[in-house]
Structures are given as structure tokens and as C-alpha cells.
């Protein structure tokens, strides 16, 4: 089962279906299908989602791709990403992982 760690403050938005993507840099490869988010502070706190597609792009293209250009100017997005990846740059290639809300996850 593929999985990714996630900070606890983001889990409520994942569970509610408000957060439907994650931006990662230099982490394991994720492919479409089931994926488990694991709380970095409590490994027993998890959320299962279904990854629909994965895209690679420069960090500078992410906000526009996700329709968040007004909310995430380059400097703000870079600052937020550096909380998790201190050496990331605005031109770094990142992976954007898109997923359905947890309620839409159906085991096959």
C-alpha cells in the first residue's frame, strides 16, 4: 500500500474533502490508486484516499495549475514549501498528487 506522511493540521481538510491534492518534492513515487495519508505525529491516525493522477511541474507552475494563483503567490508558496523542504526552490520540479475525497474512496 502506498502512503505519505502528512502534518496533523491538514488532516481535517483531507477528511472533509477540502484538500484534494498534495505537493511533494523528492519523495517516493506515487501512482494512481489507493493511498494512505499517515499523520506524522500519530501513525494510528490515517486517511485513505484514491489518487486520480500525478503531475510533475516546476513549483512556480503549481498555483496556476491548481487555480490558486491569487492565494499562493510564488513567494508565499515557496515559504510554505520550505517548512517541509528547506532547500526547495521556485524552479524545483515537484510532484502534484491529486486525489478524491475520502468519502469517494471505494475498495475494489
Image: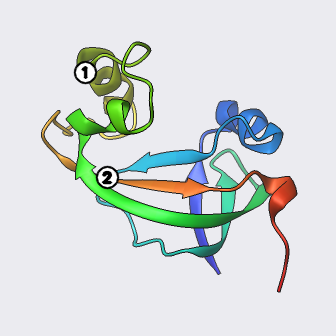
Residue at x 67%, y 30% (from the top left corner): 9
Give SS at disc 1.
helix
10 Å crowding of disc 2: few (<14), some (14-19), many (20+) = some
Q: Position of residue 88 (x, y in %)?
A: 21, 39
Q: Quadrant of residue 15?
A: top right
In what quadrant of the picture does the N terminus appear?
A: bottom right
Seen in the picture, residue 35 relative to 82 is either above or below; the reply is: below
Query: Residue 25's mark?
Result: 2
Residue bearing mark 1: 74
Tell me the mark number nearer the camera, choosing from 1 and 2: 1
Give SS at disc 2.
loop
**In this rendering, position of residue 94 left or right of residue 1:** left
Disc 1 versus disc 2: distance between alpha carbons? 16 Å
Residue at x 44%, y 24% (from the top left corner): 68
Seen in the picture, residue 79 relative to 54 is either above or below; the reply is: above
10 Å crowding of disc 1: few (<14), some (14-19), many (20+) = some
Amino acid at each position: 500500500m502506498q502512503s505519505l506522511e502528512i502534518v496533523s493540521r491538514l488532516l481535517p481538510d483531507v477528511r472533509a474533502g477540502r484538500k484534494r491534492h498534495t505537493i511533494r518534492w523528492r519523495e517516493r513515487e506515487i501512482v494512481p490508486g489507493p493511498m494512505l495519508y499517515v499523520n506524522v505525529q500519530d501513525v494510528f491516525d490515517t486517511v485513505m484516499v484514491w489518487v486520480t493522477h500525478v503531475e510533475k511541474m516546476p513549483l512556480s507552475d503549481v498555483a496556476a495549475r491548481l487555480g490558486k494563483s491569487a492565494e499562493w503567490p510564488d513567494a508565499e508558496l515557496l515559504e510554505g514549501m520550505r517548512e517541509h523542504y528547506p532547500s526547495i526552490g521556485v524552479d524545483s520540479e515537484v510532484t502534484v498528487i491529486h486525489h478524491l475525497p475520502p468519502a469517494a474512496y471505494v475498495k475494489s
